[in-house]
Image (cartoon, rainbow, N blue to C red):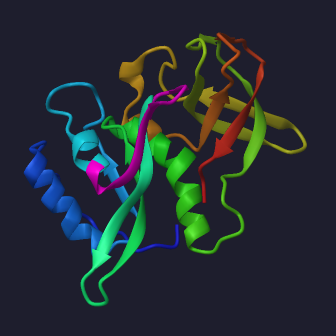
């Protein structure tokens, strides 16, 4: 994406430990990404820890998978010149495959924009489904798929795993996909032969 990742080990859900880990990174990072801790349980503390650090919004996004998302800016004071700067941040779901899809849809374009790229988004092509499935109503579904074909012959998409079973959405399955098939919010069923826009993941 044009940036250098700073990997941090997983931290506990304890407020103090999480806040300390975040503040340690904010002095050197230009963008912060978290995964997990966005549910409604008592141990999901990301909202409580991030909210006092800046302007952060958490929402249920009409997408599947990865309904829980967070975005905002965190304020950091630099002690050398006693100035403040804002760090953009994005909070992704804890489910690994859902986090990866959320990264592709929301975070990757933002990072590429910060790095000065003009082409921010994955290329999209129409492909006809080889499989019928029922899609959740009222949400935009992103289905890992393998797309084959050519501009002359047209493209076909083959879902990786069962799009109707959440258990089939794993990082192993996602690693076999070269695209994300996008089912619009208005659709509740995908028919064989139906064209869908597909975000091509191959670089």
Please state the horizontal and vertical placement of residue 181, each as a whole percent of the image: 64, 32
Image x and y of residue 154, in percent: 84, 36
Relative vertical location of residue 22 with respect to residue 154 in this rendering, above or below:
below
Indicate yes or no whether the magenta region holds residue 58. yes
Residue at 34% x, 72% y is 29
The quarter of the image holding the C terminus is bottom right
In this view of the protein, which residue sits in the foreground, 10 or 151?
10
Question: With 125 as the anchor, is 88 left or right in this view?
Answer: left
Is 5 situated left or right of 140 in this image? left
Instruction: Report whether residue 136 is seen.
Output: yes
Considering depth in this image, is 119 or 133 the residue closer to the camera?
119
Outermost residue toward the front in this view: 82
Where in the figure is residue 187, as x and y percent of width and height?
A: 69, 14
Residue 106 magenta: no
Which residue occupies 87% across, 38% down? Answer: 153
Q: Give the image quarter of residue 142.
A: top right
Name which quarter of the figure residue 38 lies in. Answer: top left
- First to last magenta residue range: 52-66
Residue visible at 72% across and 12% down in the picture: 191
């Amino acid at each position: 994406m044009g940036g250098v990742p700073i990997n941090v080990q997983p931290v506990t859900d304890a407020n103090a430990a999480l806040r300390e880990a975040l503040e340690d990174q904010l002095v050197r990072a230009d963008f912060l990404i978290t995964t997990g801790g966005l549910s409604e349980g008592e141990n999901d503390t990301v909202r409580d820890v991030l909210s006092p650090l800046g302007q952060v919004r958490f929402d249920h996004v009409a997408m599947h998978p990865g309904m829980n998302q967070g975005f905002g800016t965190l304020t950091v004071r630099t002690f050398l010149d006693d100035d403040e700067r804002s760090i953009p941040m994005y909070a992704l779901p804890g489910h690994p495959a859902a986090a990866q899809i959320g990264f592709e849809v929301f975070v990757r374009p933002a990072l590429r924009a910060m790095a000065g790229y003009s082409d921010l988004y994955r290329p999209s092509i129409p492909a006809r489904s080889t499989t019928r499935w029922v899609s959740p109503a009222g949400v935009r579904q992103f289905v890992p798929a393998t797309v084959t074909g050519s501009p002359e012959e047209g493209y076909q998409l083959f879902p990786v795993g069962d799009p109707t079973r959440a258990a089939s959405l794993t990082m192993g399955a996602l690693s076999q996909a070269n695209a994300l098939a996008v089912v619009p919010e208005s659709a509740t069923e995908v028919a064989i032969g139906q064209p869908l826009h597909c975000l091509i993941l191959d670089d």
